[in-house]
Amino acid sequence: MLRFEPRKNRSKFLEISAPIIAVIMTMIFGGLLFYLMGKNPFEAIKLIFWDPVMSPTFSEYSRPQLAVKAAPLILIALGLSFGFRANIWNIGAEGQYIMGALASGSIGLALYPLQAWYIFPLMIIGGILGGVIWAMIPAILKIKFNTNEILVSLMLVYVAEQILALASVGFLRNPEGLGFPGSRDLSKYSSAANPELISGTGIHLGVISAFLGVILLTYFLSYHRTGFHIKLIGQAPRAANFAGVDLRYIIIFCLSLSGGLAGVAGMFELTGPAGLINIDFNVGYGFTAIIVAFLGRLNPIGILLAGVLMSLTYVGGELAQFMMNIPAAAIQVFQGMLLFFLLSTDLLVTYKISFKTSIRK
Amino acid sequence: MKLLRVSLLVLSSLMISCFAFAADMKVGFIYIGPPGDHGWNYQHDVGRKSVDEAFGGKVETVFQENVPESADAERVMTQMALSGADMIFATSFGYMDPVLNVAKKFPNVKFEHATGYKTADNVSTYSARFYEGRSVIGHVAGKMTKSNTIGYVASFPIPEVVRGINSAYLAAKAANPNVEFKIIWIFTWYDPAKEADAAKTLIQQGADVIMQHVDSSAIMTVAEEAGVYAFGQASDMSAFGPNAHLTAIINGWGPYYVKRVQQAMDGTWKGGEQTFDGIEAGMVVIGDMSDKIPDSVKKEAQAIADGIASGKLHSFTGPVNKQDGSAWLASGETADIGTLLGMNFYVEGIEGDIPQ
């Protein structure tokens, strides 16, 4: 029988080298995949991992783009990681991301074309509240009726998507848009816009917030009592219970944090890179962020690195697609391989495989 | 050692094959979905391939599929331009603002945006008069229905889709005065499950001919199972419903793409142009007619297509009233382009409201 046993002495060296081994394994098997498709594997892997960062043609543009693409993933994953540590599974960040964008967008569009300094801060608050309120539905249902937050938060994504569609063709539609779906372009409305801060890079306030978030939450997790309680619940739920940790408070806290961060990520994306509310506004950041959270081992700095790595596979994957006509599906398989190898090497660092049959029952 | 030598050999040969040729011109295409959808994206890819064929090795085409209509589109087009693309075709409406942003940064790259309405010095737009095709299939639908109920699966209430419904309805009504339209809006361009559900609902409500303005072939499959008729959207879909498939409105982008690339090579390409072509230019093509259609109806349909191509017929010819009964087109009058491009009302006789 094949069994996994926790390792007693975890090797620090293995823990650090595991991600590197995973990336090398992905290169080998991904390269094999590209080779079997008749594409030059070395060229493809160079395009994915090397060119966005180092090539003279692309890097000047791609480097900051890596941060822009990673920012919403990092913001959302940071929030999710707190809940995941405490076994509170918010799977619906995608919905909270949409509702944050909708709430802030509604505020901005309601005040259009007024020019005032307070509009943008008001929209940030709206974005946070939109996400928090949407996340409070599974939180309150869990506390009051002990419902499963995985199901409730996931289902609310689909509700949010329908509201988004309704807004795009209905109450937030651009009156000057000839009947096409989609709101006014908020990135062109200066009081509501989230413009690039350094010209030509695309770096916007959301990117800065993601980096600040990493620092703040690292500190919070290490030094704040609630941060300690969250870690405690994850590692020793019974001990947490005896220590008098109020689980209801933790549920509310974790879902507010993840909802608020997802909501504000939606707000920054809406007012910056996306510009307008439309039916296809959400592109799956809320779901990808779950992967980023786990890849980063639920640790803020790990999440920062994982977010950038994910974003590299997107940006580099696009290069490989149109430079070599590799189908999008092959790039997704490649991304899948990367996740698989990262998680499996992680497993092997924490556990060892034993082939003995277990006698104990 | 032997393994090392073999792998070095493989490596070097691969490297050489990669840098073997350089084309005069590089043309990029971005697609909203996969070219394997047998619909919208598939036809754009067919157009791209006809550029490959027309220019041989002189033009290199590249494409990127599944590009969301957001900041991602801007990044993909920027990277394409950086990689040396001379011309970029952006093949979905939602790329409009990203195209303009990227075009500003790369004044020497020529941009072509499908179905949009904003242009610039290096941005032209192109769109097809699909409503002309709807007149032809509307006539066929009116003749083929026995229950006098035609189902219509619509995507978004934008002028393009509303125009198609009106055009199809007017043609169907002219062919069969008792005809009635049932319309379901599903608010997506491509969602096979939703499309199939809508088609099933329409069939339950008595529709025996289904028209669609959504992209997948799911409706054709449902129609085949239920024993009713349907039409191919964007491409011939008879493979999905050999008995159900009456004919198709085929998007013919190839001639336009070849023409524009040629102009770019000759130096005669211009930005700021807005092309709106139909059957005559080959941008809208009527597919093969099924054997299920009686010969007389085939002839009538062909005559409508020919008449539109020659300019003798127009899909919107008065007298036509709006849904509320107010007059729109006087007898003999044809619709002007402005009204067509902004169409936001049903014509008289269609029941229900356009979702607001």
Image: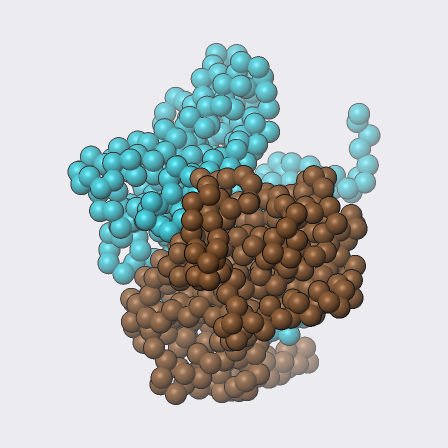
Chain colours: A cyan, B brown
Residue at (46%, 47%) from the top-left corner?
B322
Is B101 positioned to the left or the right of A79 in the image?
Answer: left
Mark yes or no: residue A285 visible. no
Is A319 positioned to the left or the right of B284 in the image?
Answer: left
Spot occupied by residue A58 in the image (x, y as percentages of width and height): 38, 68
Nearer-the-camera pick, A188 or A288 = A188
Q: Quadrant of the C terminus of chain A?
A: top right
Res. A202 image quadrant = bottom left
Is A290 positioned to the left or the right of B233 in the image?
Answer: left
Residue A261 lies, with reference to residue B314, above or below; the image says above
Spot occupied by residue A144 in the image (x, y as percentages of width and height): 53, 13
Spot occupied by residue B208 in the image (x, y as percentages of width and height): 73, 48
Residue at (46%, 43%) from the top-left corner?
B325
Mark yes or no: residue B269 visible. yes
Residue at (57%, 32%) from the top-left corner?
A155
Nearer-the-camera pick, A338 or A257 = A257
Residue at (46%, 38%) from the top-left corner?
A166
Spot occupied by residue B250 in the image (x, y as percentages of width and height): 60, 67
What is the residue that sits farthest to the front in this orientation? Answer: B331
